[in-house]
Image (cartoon, helix red, strand yellow):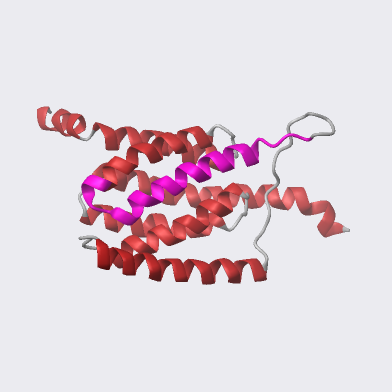
Amino acid sequence: MEPIFTWFYNHWIENLAVVTGLIYIILSVKQHLGCWPFGIISSVLYLYVFFVAKIYADMFLQLYYILMGVYGWIHWARIDSASSEKKELPVTKLKLRQGMLLLMLTLLLWLLIAKLLMRFTDSPVPWIDAFTTAFSFTATYMLARKILEHWIIWVVVDFISVALYFYRGLYSSIVLFLIYTILAVLGYKEWKKQWTKENSGILIS
């Protein structure tokens, strides 16, 4: 048992990042405003974890997560100026033109990040690191805007991240991202159910 406790002690920052990240994704599925502060805390911790593991693109991605966490927190908590009552941001679906634009920008970002990693860092996995980073940028923006299809992106990114973290020895994060993958599927179903409910009157009319 001692080696297990030693491992947990030596990796307490990663383990705490995992716990706060798990709370974040569960609250995201529930569309609870409290997801954002937990996401910010998890991202701050992962800044250090990814720096040590030399997963540089994901490290810088955490800075973006922190900024988007603040933006999402404010955006989800918007106030109706007329009634001074909180309004819940509705779930929306991705429009074709919007989706094509986001895909094009994400692919360009993937290429740019990969080239930067190969040129300026000693990353052993620049293309995979860049892929998860670029698509995470897009998915996080879509989450902040409550766009339903962001969950589909997370399923792909989280699954690939499992293989990346196994390669880099981040075993606690492997468990987290396996759970992330499952919760992303559940999140998509939950949000789609709400979107259908919110738009049933429009669809009928």
- Residue 6 position by quadrant: top left
In the rendered image, residue 43, in percent from the top left (x then y), is placed at 40, 41
Which part of the image, by quadrant, shows the C terminus? Answer: bottom right
Q: Residue furthest left?
A: 2
Q: Is residue 200 left or right of residue 69?
A: right
Residue 170, can we see it?
Answer: no
What number of labels is visible? 0
In the rendered image, residue 167, in percent from the top left (x then y), is placed at 21, 56
Residue at left offset 59%, top offset 35%: 32
Residue 54, can we see it?
Answer: yes
In the rendered image, residue 126, in percent from the top left (x then y), is placed at 28, 64
- Residue 172 position by quadrant: top left
- Residue 20 position by quadrant: top left
Task: Please state which of residues 88 and 84 is positioned toward the viewer in this rendering.
Answer: 84
Part of the protein shown in magenta: 51-80
Residue at left offset 64%, top offset 52%: 192
Task: Decide whether the magenta segment is chiefly helix, strand or loop.
Answer: helix
In the rendered image, residue 157, in percent from the top left (x then y), is placed at 41, 58
Task: Please state which of residues 48 and 182 is positioned toward the viewer in this rendering.
Answer: 48
Residue at left offset 46%, top offset 70%: 107
Which part of the image, by quadrant, shows the N terminus? Answer: top left
Q: Assess whether residue 61 is covered by the magenta stretch.
A: yes
Q: Is residue 186 left or right of residue 173?
A: right
Question: Height in image: 195 above or below 80?
Answer: below
Q: Assess whether residue 12 is covered by the magenta stretch.
A: no
Residue at left offset 32%, top offset 60%: 129
Q: Residue furthest front?
A: 120
Question: Height in image: 14 above or below 143?
Answer: above
